[in-house]
Image: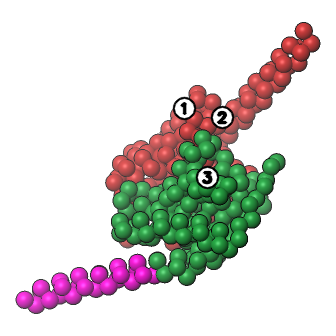
Chain colours: A green, B red
Amino acid sequence: MDKKIDILNQEGKEFFMLEAIKEAKKAEAMLEVPIGAVVVLDGKIIGRGHNLRESTLQSTAHAEMFAIKEACQTLENWRLARAQVFVTLEPCPMCSGAMMLSRVAEVYYGAADPKGGTAGTLMNLLQDERFNHVAYVESGILEEECGALLTNFFRKLRVEKQKKKNLEKSSLKD
Amino acid sequence: MDKKIDILNQEGKEFFMLEAIKEAKKAEAMLEVPIGAVVVLDGKIIGRGHNLRESTLQSTAHAEMFAIKEACQTLENWRLARAQVFVTLEPCPMCSGAMMLSRVAEVYYGAADPKGGTAGTLMNLLQDERFNHVAYVESGILEEECGALLTNFFRKLRVEKQKKKNLEKSSLKD
């Protein structure tokens, strides 16, 4: 099997992670949890996506799923062999599974997900040899930026919730 | 949290698995690997789906994904709490993940998948307490029928391949 894998240098990895961050910011602008992803083949982005769970009311509306779908459409093939996925947050079981089913070659992520990450944190689905596909996985690409997107988003959410509570309290006093 | 779970009797479980089998047969009629699923809430089917990987050229086009998407649409909610999934084949990591993200209460499957099943065979994602959701899982509902659908499909495929080869050989001799 032709399994040529492009070895990206750090600059290349950060270039594509910045594209995933752009996607995450599109989610943030829609008050969605800021997570973004791109799929890359031969140095070109063939799929992009950002989290849209609240807007679509779909549990499966994760960034990676949209990016993978677009990539399959672009290639007119459900196999994304040799493709690279860049995602701001460590993938969950669903998205790890979608990457395995698509036979992507490499997965790069930014921040680890201690609550649900399955590309190294809770387990490593992408490198479990019992499945019929194993991918290369690398974590920590622009980790700080990717993580800060999320912590800032949730901090802002908490502040707004508190403000709302305070307003309600003060209006009750009136 | 209101987590009332309907305890189905065997007849009820088989009734809904037969609906999943109907979905699998729709896939078969399109020369897709025959796998089908339904999502049930309060005794009603709120989502149906069958495998469409080859027709859609999408790696993520699994039966369960369509059934879950339709169920989210029906309820206008990404949370499918109290819902039950019936699927002819043990779910893969992607579909197990989608069920966890949807917070479905119960998962019933027919045949086990020794190559990629993650609801008891290779692992049990749906009952791993490190994730933020754990579902009830029951296997073996109409197991024989669900398994036979798949073995017959692949047998037919092999026979047709052999016929084609024989035809090619005999035409070479002419």
Read off the chain for label 2.
Answer: B
Count every numbered label the image shows and give the total: 3
Read off the chain for label 1.
Answer: B
**Residue positioned most to the left:** A174
- Comparing marks 1 and 2, which lies closer to the viewer? 1
Q: Earlier in the sequence, mark 1 or mark 2?
A: 1
Q: Which residues fall within the magenta stretch? A: A151-174
Observer able to see residue A91? no
Kindly indicate the quadrant of the structure image that contains residue A157.
Answer: bottom left
Mark 2, Cα crowd under 10 Å, few <14 / some 14-19 / many 20+, is some
Kindly indicate the quadrant of the structure image that contains residue A117.
Answer: bottom right
B28 sits to left or right of B45: right
Q: Position of residue B161 (x, y in %)?
A: 78, 26
Give me the C-alpha separation between circle 3 and circle 1.
Answer: 19 Å
Tag 3 residue:
B91
Vertical placement of residue B33 versus A138, above or below: above
A15 sits to left or right of B168: left
Q: Position of residue A77 (x, y in %)?
A: 63, 42
Q: Are marks 1 and 2 on the same chain?
A: yes
Tag 2 residue:
B149
Vertical placement of residue A32 versus A78, above or below: below
Q: Secondary structure at mark 3?
A: loop
Q: Secondary structure at mark 2?
A: helix
B8 sits to left or right of A57: right
Tag 1 residue:
B26
**Residue at 88% of width from left, 18% of height from top?**
B169
Of residues A17 and A95, the one drawn nearer to the viewer in this rendering: A17
Identify residue type, mark 3. Answer: Pro
Of residues A56 and B79, the one drawn nearer to the viewer in this rendering: A56
Q: Secondary structure at mark 1?
A: helix
Give me the C-alpha separation between circle 2 and circle 3.
Answer: 16 Å
